[in-house]
Every structure is written in C-alpha cells, then in structure tokens.
Image: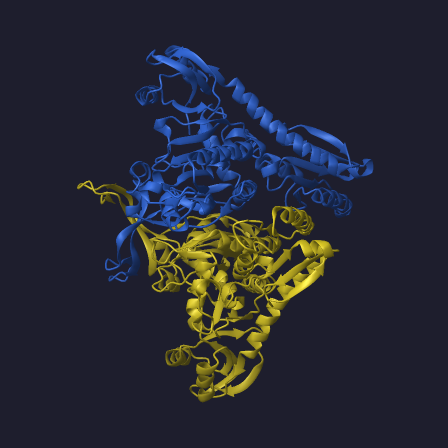
Chain colours: A blue, B yellow
C-alpha cells in the first residue's frame, strides 16, 4: 500500500490524518493547535480562493482588511455573540518583552500591560461594525458589500488538521443593507454561491438549509448552511451564511437616514468558508491509494512521465512529451513533465497517484513509433491508450469527465447514505449501523434536539430549504411535527 | 481645492494623511496603531499582490502558510534576532475570558494562563526554520523556495497609515540552500524582482544597495534594499532582501547531508515587501488635487462620464459610451461608466481626479454628432479631443504613456534631488535646504554613522550596488574612504 497508511475501513480518522501529512498538504506546528499549510496544500487553497474571490466580485463584493485585534469590550456589546465567541480565544495582555534578569532568555515586561486586553479575532463582526458606524450616514451609503480574506483564531481544545485548528484561514463577508428583505436576499445569495462553488469546484454535493436555533451563529437571526457527507457517513458543515438582523447595528449604534427622512438601524449579513474546505475535499473523494483531486482544484492536472532505457531514447521521448505539454498548456491545463533521472517510472506512478494528480501520461519509445500515449485516470484508476492526434482536446475532455465523475460518485454515495427514520429504534439503529443523513421528524424544540444529541451524538444538520411539508411525529417525544429535518453525526 | 486638504507645500505630512483617508484608501481603527484598509486601497494592494505573486512564481517560489503565533523561547535562539524583534510585540498570555463576577462584561480567566507566552509574529524566520528542520535531510531536499502572504504585528509607538502600523500586511520569502553562493544569488535575485516591480508597476525609480551593519536586519549577514525618494526629499525603504548565512540553521539545528556525504548547516535568505508600498505609491506621485495612480495599479483605469441635459440625450450618449466601454474592456482595460443621476459632471470630474483615475472620458451630444470624445489625463491634467475611431488602441496607448510619464517624472525628480557633498558644511547645508539623496564619503565605522545620525537625523540609506570606487575623506571624521554612500532623512 502506498506510503504505509491505514485504509479508510481500518481507521478512517488515521487514514485522513496520515494522508494530509504524507501528501504534503499540512502538518502540525510547534504551536499547539496551529498548523503549517505546506506548498501543495496551499496551492489547492489558492485555487479555491481564486474561484471564490471571482464569484464574490461577480456578485458585487469588494475586498477590504480590518484589524486582527479586537478590544475585549467590543465582544460584550452583542449579548449572544459574547457567549459564542469571546470565551476560548487568544488574549493579548502585554506589548513588550525584556531580557530576563538571570540572563536566560526573555520574559514579559510587566510594565507594558495593555489597559484593555485585545482579543485575536475569532470572527470580525464587532470590529467591522465599529467601522461601519462611521461609513454609514444615509441610505445612499448602502448597501456595503465587503469581504475579507484573513486568519482567525479560536482556542480549540481538540484540533485536527484543516477540520478544526486554533488558527485557520478563511474569508468573511460582512454586508450592510437598508432593508430586512435585502439582507435576507443577500444571505441566501451567498449560500447559493457557496453551494455552486462546492458542487462545481470541490465536486461536492451539498444540502442547503437553515440551522436550528441551537446551532445558529452567535448573534444571527437565521443561519443558512451547506452540509456535505463524508465517506465515513459523518456530515461536515462546509459553509455558513448568516442573516444578522439589526443586532450588530444596535450593538454598535449604526443608523442611517432613510429615503423618507427617518433614522433606522442597518440590516446585516455575514458569511464565511475556511480552510476546513480542504478537509472536506480530502475526506469526500480520496481513497486508500491517496488523494483524489477534482481537476479544477488540482495544482498539477496532468503529469507526463517518460519511459526510457538510455539517453538517446530519453531525448526522443522528451521531444514528443514537451510537444504534448505545450499543446495542453495552450488549453490552460497545468502540466508537469517529470524527467527526474533519480526515480524509476514505477515510483513516480505511485507518487502521483498518491498526490491525486487527475491524469497521468506515460510515453515511451514504442508510443513514439505508434503515435500513442498511455493515459491513466486517478479517479477510476483506469488506463487507456490514446492516439496523439488531437491530444489537447482529448485530455481537456477527459479532465471534464473526471470532474463530473468525482461529483457523480459523491452524489451517488450521499443518496445511498440518505435514509428516513420513522421512530426512535429505526433512528438509533441507522445511526449505529450506517450513519449518513437521516431524515426524521422532530418536534421543533431546542430541548428535544439537545436530548437527541446527548443520547446519540447526532445533531440536526439543517432544515433543508424548500423542505417538503409532511405531517409526522417526533422520533423522540412523539409530539406532532410538520416536516422532516436532517440528522447526522458531524465533524 | 479638492476635498479641503493642505497642499504638499503647506504641510506634506498632513497632505499625505488626509489624502489616504479622504480618498478612501485606509483609516485608523479602534485599535491603537492598527489600520482598516478600505476597499479602494485594498483593490490597489490586490493588484500589487497579483503582480508580485506572479513574479515570485516565475522565479520558482511556492506559497505556504505558517502559524501566526511564535513561542517566546524561539526568539531567544538567534542572538541578534531577539534584540531586533522580540521586544515591542503583542504577547498572548491567556486563552480564555469569562464573565465578570460583577456582571459587567468579560474578564481574563486567570486559570487559563499559557505555560509559555506566544508572540504574534513580527516576522517568521524562527517558526519557519523550526519547520524546515523536519523538511530538510539531504541536499535533495534543497533548495526550498517558499513565500508567505501574511499579517504581522510590531508594536510601534508612533504609527502612520501604511507607513508604520502595528499590524501590517506583507509577504515574506524564506529560502533554504545548500551553498552560501546560491543563497547570495537568491537574495540578489529577489532584490532585482523588487526593483523591477517598483519601477514597472509602482512607476517608482529605486536605488539598489546594501545596508550598513547598523541598519541590517536582525540576524542577517547582508541586507539588500531598494530605496525610493519621496516628494518631500525623504527616502523610503521599499523592500529588503536578506542573506542570513547559517544563523537560523544553527539556531534551529537544520543540517543536511551533502552530496559528498558530509553534514552541513543550511544557508538561508528572507525577503519582504509590505503595505508600506501603498504609502510609497501615494507619496511619490500624488499631487495637490489628489491621488495620481499609475495605470497598472489603478483599480479603475478609465472612467466615462456622460454629459446630457435630458433623458433622451442620456440614452443616446449611453449607447455610445457603452460601446466604448466594451471596446476598452476587450483590451483588458478596467472601465467604469458613471451615469449616476444624483451628481453633476463637474462633481464627478473632481471626484475621479481626486481618486487618481488615470483617464477620464467625457461624452456628450456634440461628441456624438462629431464622432469624438473628450479625454483628460490625470497625470498631466491635459485634455484632448479624440476621434472615436480606433479608440481602444488610442486609450491603451495613452495608458502606457501615462505609466511611463509618471515614472519619468519621478526619476527626473530624484535626479534633481541627488547631490554630492564633500564636507560637513556642504552636507548639513544640503540636508537643511534641499534634502534628497546625498552622496558623501564615510569612514566605514558604525560609530561615525551613528554620530551623523544623532547630529542630522540623516542615515545611510544604502551603499549602492556596483558602486563607483573613489578615494575621499569622511565628511565627519576626515578619515579615508573608498566610496561615497547615500545619505538621506528617511521614513
């Protein structure tokens, strides 16, 4: 087995962790809970960023940057927000170090204590709305449609690479609107952007829905989310978009003069996705041979490996290979030609399979004679012989097929793993045997949801948008319910 | 005068600050020394980032991301580095807040004290070399050519928007090499990248040179820099590239097996530019009417303003204007058509002049009749009438001319403001009357440099690369000198 790591069947959690590290995506650092995102992982993240950033700009948003530090008192201004965010966080208390009197290293200079502690942002609503107060006077200043790419810190006790780290990278959109309706439309629009991105780029089918009150963002009136199913049957929240009502406007006193001449509080949304998507990408598609990357996010889409016995053969093969490389690059395909003489082709085949390169091309003297190449697909592990004629179009088409196939496979898996449960026994049996998404009736109370979570570790992942209404009885309490909601164990 | 702010002559410092704020580039935040980079400013920074990132990748570098926090003890490992960086910094001491017993707000939870304090990175050599130790075993693992885009924090006492802020955005390259020579070549190559970027994109002529020992980066054996002259005759260090020798490899015990079978410490470089470049851009080119942006960095390169008296005229003008817009956009030019009915053309002219849009096009009913448009250049404030035929090529050409002219003007200014001083009296007279760059002899000692700084506030900005050797006498001590160095007062 490649790289000596467990199969998904043997130990899914270890499989994930080993894969992330051995494929060079990320690793743990010397700082507890903080990861190093390595070049190969970062190159994938950059592709995600570029695609999302384009979508944000196409929907009218601009980027900006706000301070990493937030004065402690800001968190207390929005009552539910402080409960959700201001507790487990990195607190800056001093601004200077000095040489230790014993000559060994450096210590905190106690005379350099901040009057008010600063929090390393866990999310930026407060510092941003403190700025918006000065930016917004009249309805003419609205809407404000801003996004920020940033690092944030949440002091997590149990961390896992990409999925839950103390510091992570994300984008956070923060918008301000004149009306409730406009803000809700914005929150829903950005959910759609996330869903489109997940499906078209990550090849990840997602459920769109709203969170229950228990699972809502601290400070939101409504949290929209996309939920994706991982190969172990657990759900992963892949992005959220919040309708914040006037909560932050009230907390930071942000009013505007309306067209009609009155003064009103501004309506808000915020929305974000993070490097957690890297975890989703790995967990959704990869296999026991290593990474499987959707072509649209693969830093290298095609690798070409020469097969040769001597320098003369290498020269002939290289000439052909470079022609193919140029033809593909002219199509906008990223190609690596690996003629490193220190490794055998077999070693290279394994290596690129492990790294998830979507298409591998091998070319040797016999191919040159016959005008062919050998093509291997990473997703299905199939091999084909292609004639070199029109190779750029063929490979371009193949990459699209692979992108589609990865999505289709994930969708089929999710459909297989989505079931109804009509009573408590069915529910718990399913959870313990098959996991996946379970559609079940719930009486709509936070107490019942909490109780189900305590008993099963399953949570309501979302109430699907445009959910089918259907009379039924809550699986726990038997109380009446008007719709099924989606339960799962989750990351 | 536009926007009611002082001229450069009246108060250069206030002119700069007002311009940055009123043009919507950045503003101060609620957190001391930390700025908010507003959308218009950030859009310029994004263009800088994109251009630099491309140049880094073309020279073989990859991006990665390392933790924002650095354990305090890491700073003590490299003796000179700790002196330079670990003193004025943001220190994280706790990881939790709790509700205040008096019910008023939240306080630091004293039970959640970190065993070892964490420093918010002022620069990342230490945390990165701690990682490199695990990445490098043999010469085959070298070179490592990595760049990081990140925020950093240095607790500055006197801050100015973009020029000196507690938190700023930057990129930091960190490379590891098998030989001293290769590392020096890398440090020099990246200096060239910076100089090319400054000249081609910022339209900013720069001096390339090395720093004296006093001004070297803490931990470097050689600091290369680019220095640019601002309109008030002060110099601004616009980028630095450091040859770090084996200092960090020794501090973090990073050795590699050589081809010959030995074990050696790895050679290092680091290099960075920051949002300080935004300050340089504004201070080098802008004038008393507002920003002047080089077309290559202008978020909007061309604005089109319709002139009309009624809805019918607007409709006709709009039709023509949108055709021109599409033609320009097909050339890759970014165009805004401003048909906002709430503002008069005169107001718009002033506004876009103030914001530094390189080209303004006005089009009215008479233009439609005559097949013309009115074109105004922001850099020279000249106006022309252009025939609409071939307008895309004409405007494309004009933008290139403007980019060139801004550079040429800055270069001419620098040449005017560059003088020789042959003795102390000439030196101090020049400094007090004309400022600018002063080439003068210096005896090569840190003591003399320090003394000159004390007496005049002028520092040695650099020893130019490929400097002309010339016998002379130090302006302060009269001791022999073999070359002139460049003095100036600096930001």
Q: Residue at x 38, y 26 (%)?
A: A212
Q: Quadrant of residue B373?
A: bottom right
Residue B150: percent from left, percent from top: 46, 52
Task: Say whether residue B118 is visible.
Answer: yes
Task: Say whether residue B371 is visible.
Answer: no
Task: Look at the image and tell me in which quarter the C terminus of chain A lies.
Answer: top left
Q: Is residue A310 above or below residue A295?
A: below
Q: Nearer the viewer, residue B122 or A289?
A: B122
Q: Nearer the viewer, residue B448 or A118?
A: A118
Residue B59: percent from left, percent from top: 61, 56
What is the total number of numbered labels drawn onto the structure image? 0
Q: Is residue A429 above or below residue A370?
A: above
Q: Residue at x 32, y 36 (%)?
A: A84
Q: Is residue A223 above or below residue B201?
A: above
Residue B146: percent from left, percent from top: 53, 52
Extreme left residue here? B102
Residue A469: percent from left, percent from top: 45, 15
Q: Residue at x 41, y 58 (%)?
A: B251
Task: Look at the image and tell me in which quarter the N terminus of chain A lies.
Answer: top right
Indicate left or right for B486 with B120 as reference.
Answer: right
Indicate left or right for B366 with A256 as reference.
Answer: right
């Amino acid at each position: 087995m490649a790289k000596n790591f467990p199969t998904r069947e043997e130990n899914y959690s270890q499989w994930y962790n080993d894969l992330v590290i051995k494929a060079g995506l990320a690793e743990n650092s010397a700082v507890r809970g903080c990861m190093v995102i390595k070049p190969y992982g970062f190159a994938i993240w950059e592709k995600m960023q570029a695609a999302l950033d384009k979508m944000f700009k196409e929907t009218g948003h601009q980027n900006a940057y706000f301070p990493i530090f937030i004065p402690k008192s800001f968190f207390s201004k929005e009552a539910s927000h402080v409960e959700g965010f201001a507790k487990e966080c990195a607190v800056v208390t001093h601004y200077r170090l000095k040489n230790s009197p014993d000559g060994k290293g450096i210590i905190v200079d106690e005379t350099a204590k901040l009057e008010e502690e600063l929090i390393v942002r866990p999310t930026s609503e407060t510092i941003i709305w403190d700025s918006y107060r000065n930016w917004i006077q009249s309805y003419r200043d609205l809407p404000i449609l801003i996004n920020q790419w940033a690092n944030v810190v949440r002091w997590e006790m149990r961390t896992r690479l990409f999925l839950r780290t103390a510091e992570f990278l994300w984008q956070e959109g923060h918008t301000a609107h004149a009306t409730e309706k406009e803000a809700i439309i914005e929150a829903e629009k950005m959910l759609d952007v996330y869903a489109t991105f997940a499906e078209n780029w990550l090849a990840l089918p997602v459920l769109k829905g709203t969170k229950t009150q228990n699972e809502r963002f601290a400070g939101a009136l409504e949290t929209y989310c996309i939920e994706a199913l991982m190969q172990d049957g657990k759900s992963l929240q892949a992005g959220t978009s919040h309708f914040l009502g006037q909560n932050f406007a009230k907390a930071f006193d942000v009013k505007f003069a309306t067209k009609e001449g009155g003064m009103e509080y501004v309506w808000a949304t915020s929305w974000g996705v993070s490097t957690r998507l890297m975890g989703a990408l790995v967990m959704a598609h990869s296999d026991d041979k290593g990474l499987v990357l959707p072509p649209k996010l693969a830093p290298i889409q095609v690798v070409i490996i020469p097969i040769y016995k001597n320098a003369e053969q290498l020269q002939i093969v290289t000439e052909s290979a470079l022609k193919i490389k140029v033809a593909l690059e002219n199509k906008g395909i990223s190609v690596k030609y690996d003629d490193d003489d220190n490794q055998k082709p077999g070693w290279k085949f394994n290596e690129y399979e492990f790294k998830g390169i979507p298409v591998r091309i091998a070319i040797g003297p016999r191919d040159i004679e016959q005008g062919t190449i050998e093509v291997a697909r990473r997703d299905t592990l199939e091999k084909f012989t292609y004639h070199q004629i029109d190779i750029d179009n063929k490979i371009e088409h193949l990459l699209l097929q692979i992108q589609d196939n990865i999505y289709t496979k994930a969708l089929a898996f999710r459909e297989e793993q989505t079931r109804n449960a009509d009573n408590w026994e069915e529910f718990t049996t399913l959870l313990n045997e098959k996991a996946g998404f379970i559609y079940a009736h719930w009486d709509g109370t936070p107490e019942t949801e909490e109780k189900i979570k305590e008993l099963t570790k399953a949570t309501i992942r979302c109430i699907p948008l445009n959910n089918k209404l259907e009379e039924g009885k809550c699986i726990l309490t038997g109380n009446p319910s008007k719709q099924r909601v989606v339960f799962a164990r989750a990351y």
